Image: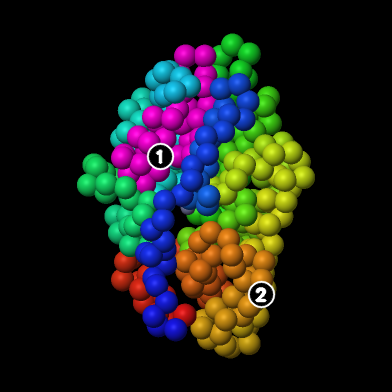
Amino acid sequence: MGSKPFASSTDLAPKVEEFVTLADGVHALTAEGDPNVGAVEAEDFLVCFEARATPAAARLWLDRLRERTDKPVRYLVLSHYHAVRTLGASAFDADVVVAHERTRALIAERGEQDWDSELGRMPRLFLEPDTIPGLTWPTMTFSDRLTIPLGGDRGDLELRYLGRGHTAGDVVGWLPQQRILFAGDLVESRAALYTGDAFHDEWATSTLDNVAALGAEVLVGGRGAVARGRAEVDAAIAQSRHFLDELRRTVGTVHGRGGTPREAFEAARAALAPRFGGWPIFEHCLPFDVQRYWDECDGVDWPKIWTARRDREVWAALQ
Ligand SMILES: [Zn+2]
């Protein structure tokens, strides 16, 4: 068992990217389970959602976007602090980098360690890592809601904080007029959930309730294909909730009876693999997911910092 390759370190095959236009001026790029990105056109500027892992990787997305529009990027929105979604920010030349206030605090607290950790876990996403100039610092933060008027008849883009979930500071991008939601990693569509920095109980209950209450008709999750129509949107939210519920049930049961993290991992894997085992990053995420919920059961509210070293220790202990 010890020979199982670490995280996604051996997942090196390029993914097929799909550029989709979801409504007039609303675009997304999905990539077979790699992190999704999006863009919303205002009358005379762009709002980009997520930055990718490196400036070189971001430029590939911007090249596609520039086939549709040459508007300048006024806002770059970071849905949360994870390196694969933030370190490409410099390529956007954005006037403003927006995030939740806790995302800025998390970058200050653990941005360097997270960069090392994610580079080790998912090297393929870090195209030309030497192009990263340093950590990405949000230049504007908010705590609850930030509304960006798009001008003309385009309506508003609402950046909303819906509760703790995938991290302590996730935000979503919501277009109430178009009923399109960029959900960040709070919802995945046919991809496994990474919960190593999560608040499982809150995410699986009130936070996902708040996501569902928006009533989106199109949902771009953090990974996976775009969900179109209420049935697919509801299914993506339900799938994310089910993954969390099964993780909480299995790990919580083993913890409650005085078992070990390794037994919890086996129980979680047995429950989740039949439905999620073939989906992107399932094997990669599960040890980190189990360890974080185990910590929560131990009463650790604020997630422990993942370092490249702790990653390997937990991987070895649970597999
Ligand atoms: Zn993330």
| Pointer 2 residue | 271
Q: Is residue 221 left or right of residue 118?
A: right
- The residue at 31%/40% (across/down) is 56
Q: Farthest bottom residue? A: 258
Please, what is the three-letter code of the amino acid marked with disc 2? Answer: Ala
Position of residue 227 relative to residue 120, above or below, is above
Helix, strand or loop at mark 2: helix
- Judged from this view, the residue extending furthest toward the top is 152
Magenta segment includes 308: no
Going by the picture, which residue comes out furthest to the right?
231
Q: Is residue 230 above or below residue 269?
A: above
Q: Which numbered disc covers residue 51?
A: 1
- The secondary element bearing badge 1 is classed as loop
Q: Where residue 140 sits: x, y (%)?
A: 41, 33
Image coordinates of residue 203 in percent, x first then y, are 62, 56
Residue type beneath disc 1: Ala
Q: Residue at x 55, y 78 (%)?
A: 265
